[in-house]
Image (cartoon, rainbow, N blue to C red):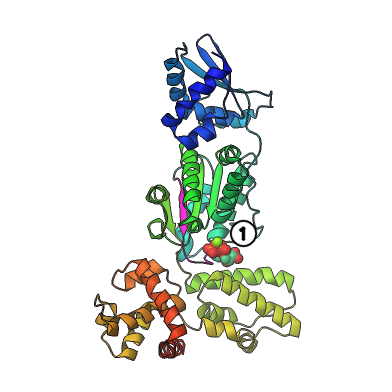
């Protein structure tokens, strides 16, 4: 068989494997010769050879046989005598393809890790103890027990911190391990870049060569179909190879709108852990730990008893805000050269304190709104669609979104089990009406002020 006839034969593979597989995997194969019943090909990388062998080997054999070639086996080898990364080859879960001679070059450059986000600096409390335990377990390395680890929760609750901590720990334990941390946005960016540069093969093999892949804020790929598709394939390939995947998101897999069902079910197939909103004890713990850190930066600053308790009590939104507040307090106190007293705290943080004055609940909002419009609470939450109930209901949804840290699905549950898209619609409706209808805007403002009072 000549090279020419291979080019003809392979055309028949398009229908068997599909256009995109064909372009990515079959087209780059370079036919060498048939020898002793073995069809030999050159491939750009070992990874690719393994992949093609495993996924399309039979197809290729069949097509070759159909064209009258006596072949019983296909073999893929990397042409150049590239240095073999034997360690990686030995570790690979693939059935060793004896025919494959080279190794993959290049690594996925992940996003840099924040040096402060370690397990040592992570304060554990009831709301995050499960997430922390799961993260610790994954950071131990070894056999993959749950794949993926899916961490979800509201903003500023420590998801990214935990992921970085896992990455640091894994790198510390085994320096040869290829650990890659990326935001979903960066994943998409790379994917789009690879498409543009017609470099999909390199992209695929890079991502399929990692040992541990972490994708942060996966909700970002919602509604982005091509990226999702690619993520799905990467995901499956890595799971097949028993590589650990860790994913974070702002909501549970089933609550992410605009994500393919196949991906949702894949995301749920490992361990799904909820990082809960902080409680008072955890916030106090975090503050105490941060004070220790700041004390090194600001050695001469005293802090009055009760200040930390006060902050832990009053700032309940998220850890990032809490940290920011404390930082500001230290910076301010060092500037004016005074001890951090309760009075100084009130002065310096008046805006933050006002904003997260007190934790407002969805139930409280519903009660206030129904009183304000003089309708029954059951009608506010219930299914009736008449305007007299529907508008106040939407206002209550809007305020719940604005004034609490509840996610849309969580708010939906508190509104008689409504879908989060309904809540989203309500929120948008009021946002719109506030611009057009000053009466609505007044109602909303009045309610907000009375809730925050
Ligand atoms: P998320 O990714 O969930 O939005 P981050 O991991 O970025 O949140 O956390 C926000 C900030 O709060 C970071 O500075 C992080 O170090 C800090 N933080 C969150 N949870 C904890 C915790 N349990 N202990 C110490 N710091 C925390
Ligand atoms: Mg994050």
Residue 272: quarter of image:
bottom left
Residue at x-position 42% and y-position 57%: 258
Q: Is residue 86 left or right of residue 218?
A: right
Nearer to me, 431 or 175: 431
Q: Is residue 63 above or below residue 380?
A: above
- Quarter of the picture containing the N terminus is top right
- Point out residue 193 in the picture as x, y percentages from the top left corner: 61, 48
Q: Which residue is mark 1?
A: 117
Is residue 152 in the magenta section?
A: yes
For the image, the number of numbered tags is 1
- Point out residue 131 in the picture as x, y percentages from the top left corner: 47, 57
Residue at x-position 51% and y-position 69%: 282
In what quadrant does ligand 2 lie?
bottom right
Nearer to me, 199 or 155: 199
Mark 1, Cα crowd under 10 Å, few <14 / some 14-19 / many 20+, is: some
Nearer to me, 161 or 241: 241
Q: Work out whether residue 47 can be spotted.
A: yes
Main SS of the magenta part reads: loop
Residue 195: quarter of image:
top right
Q: Work out whether residue 158 can be spotted.
A: no
User: Which stretch appears magenta?
Assistant: 147-158
Residue 107: quarter of image:
top right
- Work out which residue is located at the far top of the displayed protein and give it: 36
- Point out residue 208 in the picture as x, y percentages from the top left corner: 55, 39
Label 1: which secondary element: loop
Is residue 1 in the magenta section?
A: no
- Point out residue 309 in the picture as x, y percentages from the top left corner: 55, 79
Nearer to me, 86 or 449: 449
Q: Is residue 242 above or below residue 339?
A: above
**Some atom of ligand 1 lies within 8 Å of the CB belonging to the residue at label 1:** yes
Residue at x-position 68% and y-position 71%: 294
Residue at x-position 42% and y-position 16%: 66
């Amino acid at each position: 068989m000549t090279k020419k006839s291979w080019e003809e034969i392979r055309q028949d593979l398009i229908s068997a494997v599909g256009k995109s597989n064909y372009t990515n995997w079959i087209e780059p194969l370079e036919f060498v010769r048939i020898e002793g019943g073995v069809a030999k090909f050159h491939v750009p990388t070992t990874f690719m050879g393994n992949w093609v062998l495993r996924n399309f080997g039979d197809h290729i054999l069949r097509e070759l046989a159909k064209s009258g070639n006596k072949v019983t086996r296909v073999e893929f080898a990397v042409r150049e005598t590239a240095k073999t990364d034997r360690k990686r080859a030995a570790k690979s879960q693939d059935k060793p393809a004896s025919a494959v001679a080279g190794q993959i070059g290049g690594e996925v450059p992940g996003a840099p890790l924040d040096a402060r986000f370690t397990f040592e600096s992570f304060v554990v409390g009831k709301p995050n103890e499960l997430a922390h335990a799961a993260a610790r377990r994954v950071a131990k390395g070894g056999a993959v027990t749950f794949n993926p680890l899916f961490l979800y929760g509201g903003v500023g609750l420590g998801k990214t911190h935990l992921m970085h901590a896992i990455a640091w720990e894994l790198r510390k334990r085994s320096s040869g391990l290829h650990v890659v941390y990326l935001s979903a946005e960066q994943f998409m960016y790379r994917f789009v870049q690879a498409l543009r540069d017609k470099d999909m093969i390199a992209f695929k093999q890079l991502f399929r060569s990692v040992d541990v892949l972490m994708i942060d804020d996966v909700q970002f790929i919602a509604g982005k179909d091509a990226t999702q598709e690619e993520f799905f394939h990467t995901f499956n390939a890595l799971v097949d190879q028993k590589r650990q995947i860790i994913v974070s998101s702002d909501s549970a897999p089933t609550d992410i709108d605009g994500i393919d069902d196949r991906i949702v079910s894949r995301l749920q197939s490992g361990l799904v852990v909820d990082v809960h909103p902080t409680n008072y004890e955890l916030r106090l713990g975090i503050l105490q730990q941060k004070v220790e850190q700041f004390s090194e930066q600001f050695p001469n600053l005293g802090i009055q008893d009760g200040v930390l308790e006060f902050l832990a009590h009053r700032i309940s939104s998220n850890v990032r805000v809490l940290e920011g507040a404390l930082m500001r307090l230290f910076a301010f106190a060092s500037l004016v050269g005074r001890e951090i007293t309760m009075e100084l705290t009130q002065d310096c943080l008046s805006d933050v304190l006002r904003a997260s004055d007190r934790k407002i609940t969805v139930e409280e909002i519903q009660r206030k709104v129904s009183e304000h419009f003089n309708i029954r609470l059951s009608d506010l939450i219930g299914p009736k669609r008449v305007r007299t109930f529907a508008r106040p209901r939407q206002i209550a949804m809007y305020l719940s979104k604005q004034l609490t840290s509840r996610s849309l699905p969580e708010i939906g549950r508190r509104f008689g089990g409504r879908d989060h898209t309904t809540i989203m619609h309500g929120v948008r409706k009021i946002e719109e009406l506030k611009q057009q209808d000053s009466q609505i805007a007044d109602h909303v403002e009045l309610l907000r002020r009375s809730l925050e009072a």
